Amino acid sequence: MNILYNIRQKGRVTILMILMFFLVAFSSYTYNDNIGQIDDLSSEMYSDRLIAQNYIYKLEKILCQRKVMIAEQNATKIGDIFKHDRGSILGLLNNYEKTKLTKNEKIQFQELKKNVLLMMNFEQKYLLGGNKDLKRNMLKLQSESLNISLKQLDKLAETQMSIGKQLNEASKKIVTFSTLLNQFDLAIIIIIGLIIQGIIFTSRSAVPKNAQNQFLN
């Protein structure tokens, strides 16, 4: 009877140990998965948000310089800046398009790109224009496209900020969930440990009693 009792107790301890092992393994897997998600969010935050925001800032700076030159009506400076920044604008548009964009961002960007290319077409016609009337007309059209482009850049910047905020909140939720899960796992492990200790103590306490009863008989 004593042997059978010990086997049962050992069986319970074994089951609890196996349960503890799977709990630790699950906790480790969940932790690594959460770390991976946070790493992905951090990478997206840097590569597709901060860098993209920098492209928007640089493009907006170039367009603002154009607006100042046009306001000053300095023909020489206008011609020079139209020639100088064409490559920079196309490069920034190309780089921004390579970043990870949401569906809404893609629509906004395509509208911006279309309008910026139209603006640059007016600039090219301005540079090639042979008379003042044509130049004046092209400059007017360029100015209209420029103002629209600046407004579109502001919308893109707002969208970037909004998505960046969402990514930050998602990262916080993952960290909070991971912390709660670790605390829960620790509590379960402590409870299982106490149960195992109780089983071992009960098993040891039962042996002397059985032996004493056999001696009395």
Image: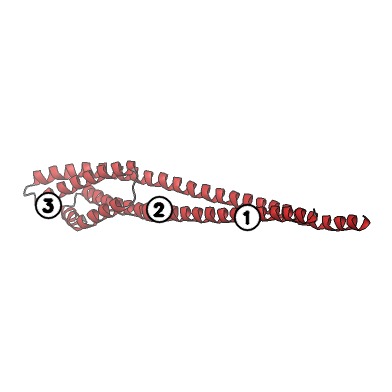
Residue labelled with disc 1: 18
Using the numbered discs, state the Cα–Cα distance from disc 3 to disc 2 in whole angstroms.
41 Å
Q: Amino acid at mark 3?
A: Leu
Q: Is 127 positioned to the left or the right of 57 in the image?
A: left
Residue 21 percent coordinates (x, y): 61, 56
Label 2 with label 1: CB-CB less than 8 Å: no
Q: Amino acid at mark 2?
A: Glu
Q: Colour scheme in the image?
A: secondary structure
Nearer to the camera, 95 or 196: 196
The residue lying furthest to the left in this view is: 130
Secondary structure type for disc 3:
helix
Badge 2 or badge 1: first in the primary sequence = 1
Q: Is 128 positioned to the left or the right of 90 in the image?
A: left
Question: In terms of image quadrants, where is residue 196?
Answer: bottom right
Secondary structure type for disc 1:
helix
Residue 182 percent coordinates (x, y): 60, 52
Residue 5 percent coordinates (x, y): 77, 53
- Rendered-image quadrant of the C terminus: bottom right
Q: Give the residue at x 21% y 41%.
A: 144
Nearer to the camera, 40 or 127: 40
Secondary structure type for disc 2:
helix
Residue 126 percent coordinates (x, y): 12, 49
Using the numbered discs, state the Cα–Cα distance from disc 3 to disc 1 in whole angstroms.
79 Å
| Label 3 vs label 2, nearer the camera | 2
Q: Is 35 positioned to the left or the right of 124 in the image?
A: right
Q: Can you see residue 82? A: yes
Q: Give the residue at x 15% y 47%.
A: 121
Residue labelled with disc 2: 44
Using the numbered discs, state the Cα–Cα distance from disc 2 to disc 1 in whole angstroms.
39 Å
Residue labelled with disc 3: 127
Badge 3 or badge 2: first in the primary sequence = 2
Query: Relative to residue 91, is residue 111 depicted above or below?
Result: above
